[in-house]
Image (cartoon, grey):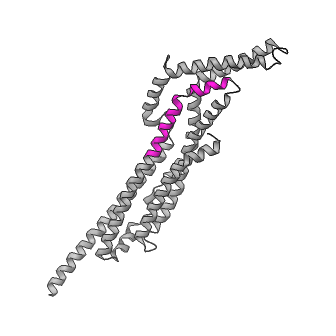
Amino acid sequence: MQFMDNIINSMMEAVRQFFIEAIISQMYGFFDMLNERLGSAAEDLATTPMDFGGQVPWNRLMEIVNTAGSAVQIVAGLLLAFFIALELVQMLIEKNNLADLDIFSMLLKWAIKSFIAILIVANAFTIVGAIFELGAMLALSTAADAGEAIGESFNSYEFAIALEELNVGQLFLLMFQIFIVHLFFNIVGIAIFVVVIGRFLEIFMYVAAAPIPLATMANQEYRAMGNNYLKSLAALAFQSFLMIITISVVGTLMLSAVQSITSDGAIGTSLFNVLGYIFLMCFALFKAPSISKSIFNAQ
């Protein structure tokens, strides 16, 4: 009987050691994936639209919209001609119905306004690129801090000691909890990927039509459309800074949760705290566009 008990105890201990090794391996895999996803997101957010995807998407966009005779160029040209002509008519009639008219100064003023408007439309994509370059410079200053490894504070030695105090049933439950956390993070990771990549798609859609709203800058009455477009571009560029701040701040909170995995004795609770912070990060990333637009008063 003693012999059978020893065999059973040896088998249970072997099972315990198997679970312990599997759990530690799962934890390392989880933190490696967490670091990779967050680091990749921070790197993408600090990238300008011109450099995103190895410059291929931007070059393709420029081929489509910057070609002579393209729909965007034709519409922008027609709108620019209309608003330049409308500006001249409004300048003529605003002088007391032509009674108080200084032709030379009025034409000079109109010519300067028209030249600036044509210059803006002709360099629409250069202006857009400059806005996103400024946004990238702001984002790069915080991207390094956001890339701090979450798993660096994970002490595998203390974690293994804590696991030694658990029985087989508790170890199995913990391994199941880690699996659930891992599974949910994969789902949230997809959402983070969609937010980051979706931002670039939104940028490309805004950029594609750049000459059209900027053509309204030629007329004082309709200039608000062009101004709002520039504010929207600035908000899009500033989004990356807010998103990297989100990753950095919530990443710091996750570091604290990781440190408490072995210090407070509630391993499973600490794991779900990490998952909660990941959901919080995802929610904040989705919220960043509306916050950025409110900062720049963009509609």
Quadrant for residue 101, please give it. Answer: top right
Quadrant for residue 137, please give it. Answer: top right
Residue shown at 34% from the left, 65% from the top: 24
Residue 213 among those drawn in magenta: yes
Q: Nearer the viewer, residue 142 or 217?
A: 217
Q: Position of residue 128 (x, y in %)?
A: 57, 31
Is residue 51 left or right of 224 when viewed as pictured? left
Question: Up-down: is 277 above or below 63?
Answer: below
Is residue 103 left or right of 69 when viewed as pictured? right
Q: Position of residue 131 (x, y in %)?
A: 59, 34
The dominant secondary structure in magenta is helix
The total number of labels drawn is 0
Q: Nearer the viewer, residue 87 or 170?
A: 87
Q: Quadrant of the N terminus?
A: bottom left
Residue shown at 54% from the left, 50% from the top: 287
Q: Position of residue 163 (x, y in %)?
A: 35, 73
The residue lying furthest to the top in this view is 103
Q: Is residue 31 visible?
A: yes
Q: Which residues are magenta?
A: 194-218
Q: Nearer the viewer, residue 290 or 89?
A: 89
The residue lying furthest to the front in this view is 97
The residue lying furthest to the bottom in this view is 1
Residue 53 among those drawn in magenta: no
Q: Position of residue 59 (x, y in %)?
A: 45, 28
Is residue 68 left or right of 104 when viewed as pictured? left
Question: Up-down: is 269 above or below 290?
Answer: below
Q: Quadrant of the C terminus?
A: top right
Q: Nearer the viewer, residue 242 or 102?
A: 102
Question: Up-down: is 261 above or below 58?
Answer: below
Q: Is residue 140 visible?
A: no
